[in-house]
């Protein structure tokens, strides 16, 4: 049993010190996973890996934090938190791009930040991923761990409790399924 799993188990049983001990155990890995994800993002991204890791931690350890069964469950939740953060960010940028709630401002007096061109694609991926999750939740979870967290096939296989060849097979299937689904998908 890993140190993370032991601390999560203690937290589940009400040990108040366990939550304080968890962050140092998972922070570097959260940071590494966030950095891997951010490396896949478009250049010029204003969100830094550290900020993504911190935001994911805040969501995971908030007042209504779920009870995690083990290390794999925790990092699966981290993958989901990072995915949601990036999706929400893309939606906000697209809303801003389309002028939602914007007041009229003299453009000569203000610097306008660039809007990532990949937001539409990210939202289409999110929509397609939700459909895949309804059909095959385990393959959708694999996509979240690989794409949004940046886990290797080996790490993903361990997190999901499957063999590495199975993870590779699921990844190939999920990528093909998502590509077909995204051809017709439009962001919400």
Image (cartoon, rainbow, N blue to C red):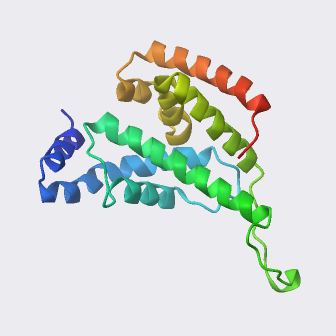
Q: Is residue 129 left or right of residue 57?
A: right
Across and down, in percent, residue 139 comes to 51, 24
Q: Is residue 54 left or right of residue 73?
A: right
- Displayed quadrant of residue 78: top left
Relative to the observer, which residue lies in front, 187 or 21? 187
Across and down, in percent, residue 30 comes to 40, 49
For residue 176, above or below residue 108:
above
Q: Is residue 183 left or right of residue 17?
A: right
Residue at screen point 41% across, 29% down: 155
Residue at screen point 67% across, 20% down: 176
Residue at screen point 11% across, 54% down: 15
Across and down, in percent, residue 173 comes to 60, 17
For residue 157, above or below residue 31:
above
Residue at screen point 34% across, 22% down: 161
Q: Is residue 82 left or right of residue 1?
A: right
Across and down, in percent, residue 100 comes to 75, 66
For residue 110, above or below residue 179:
below
């Amino acid at each position: 049993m890993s140190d993370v799993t032991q601390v999560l188990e203690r937290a589940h049983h009400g040990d108040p010190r366990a939550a304080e001990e968890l962050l140092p155990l998972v922070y570097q890995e959260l940071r590494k996973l966030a950095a891997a994800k951010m490396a896949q993002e478009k250049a010029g991204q204003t969100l830094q890996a550290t900020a993504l890791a911190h935001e994911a931690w805040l969501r995971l350890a908030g007042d209504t934090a779920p009870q995690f069964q083990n290390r794999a469950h925790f990092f699966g939740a981290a993958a989901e938190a990072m995915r949601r953060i990036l999706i929400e960010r893309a939606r906000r940028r697209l809303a801003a791009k389309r002028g939602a709630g914007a007041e009229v401002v003299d453009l000569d007096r203000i610097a306008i930040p660039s809007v990532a061109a990949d937001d539409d694609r990210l939202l289409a991926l999110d929509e397609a991923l939700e459909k895949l999750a309804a059909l095959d939740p385990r393959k959708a979870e694999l996509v979240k761990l690989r794409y949004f967290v940046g886990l290797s096939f080996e790490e993903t296989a361990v997190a999901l409790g499957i063999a590495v060849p199975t993870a590779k097979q699921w990844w190939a299937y999920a990528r093909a399924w998502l590509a077909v689904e995204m051809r017709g998908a439009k962001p919400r």
